[in-house]
Amino acid sequence: MFVDSHCHLDRLDLTPYDQDFSRFVAQTLEGGVDHLLCVSITLEKFGPMRSLIDPYPEISVSVGVHPTEEEVEEPTIDRLIALAEDSRVVAIGETGLDYFRIEGDIEWQQERFRTHIRAAISTSKPLIIHTREAREDTIRILREEGAHRVGGVLHCFTEDWDMAQAAMDLNFYISLSGILTFKNAQQIQDVAQRAPLDRLLIETDSPYLAPIPMRGKPNYPLYVRHVAECLAGLRGLTLEEVADSTTTNFYRLFPLARPANA
């Protein structure tokens, strides 16, 4: 019924599943999450992450380096392109800009961002964008690099309607996380109500940002249902309508993730 469009399965606390990843996958699928996109943060951890999900066709992956990761292998266009040849890689990222804690030079973050965009265009795979306190530079660089040619998603969206509109004009989707359920999330809830339904995705960003009523606890892909329920309530839709729409949107954006029989 649901797709978790952004999660970090290699970082999950598997204690509730007796440290058994296969048990976690089975229970997640039984709980109504039909597909998961496991998102890359560093190149060093891409190989182990890829091996972890290999037995499970219900899980896709991305390849990229998070903007806040510093003492890691710096991605090159050629390296990203080579890793993206893997048939289970459906996207480039997560990438973007995060100025929340950065001090001094920001040029390296911007250049890394541009590298990912160029690799995405070369591979014709969409981008997964992380942006925090870098609204103007994020949109500017997406425009300058012609990112509209591949599009993508602004994941865990926390910005306002103007940025959502600018992103959608560039062929990007808006992904809503558990933050949508927080009481002080009026700005995000406004975007969730105003954005066209066919441009919205849902995610957990697990193991982070658990939604209400799980806030403060480790997050799991099964909790994407709570995001869907909140979105349904905000828009006056049924849970099934939200599930169907966001799932359709996911496979439109990430066609390589679509099951062969779907």
Image (spheres, rainbow, N blue to C red):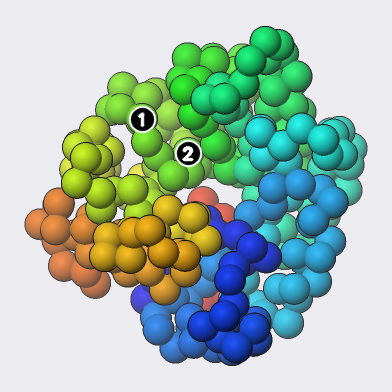
User: Neighbour class for label 2 at 10 Å: few (<14), some, many (≥20)?
Assistant: many
Residue under numbered circle 2: 154
Is 243 placed above or below 254 here? below
Nearer to us of marks 1 and 2 is: 1
Q: Nearer the viewer, residue 194 or 23?
A: 23
- Check if mark 1's residue and mark 2's residue have beta carbons within 8 Å: yes
* Mark 1 vs mark 2, CA separation in Å: 10 Å
Amino acid type of the residue tagged 1 in the rendering: Glu
Residue under numbered circle 1: 159
Is 67 placed above or below 246 here? above
Q: Quadrant of residue 186?
A: top left
Amino acid type of the residue tagged 2 in the rendering: Leu
Q: Nearer the viewer, residue 223 or 123?
A: 223
Q: Is residue 165 visible?
A: no
Question: Which residue is pictured at 61% across the width and 31% down the height?
Answer: 96
Location of residue 229 in the rendering, given as x and y in whole percent from the top left corner: 23, 64
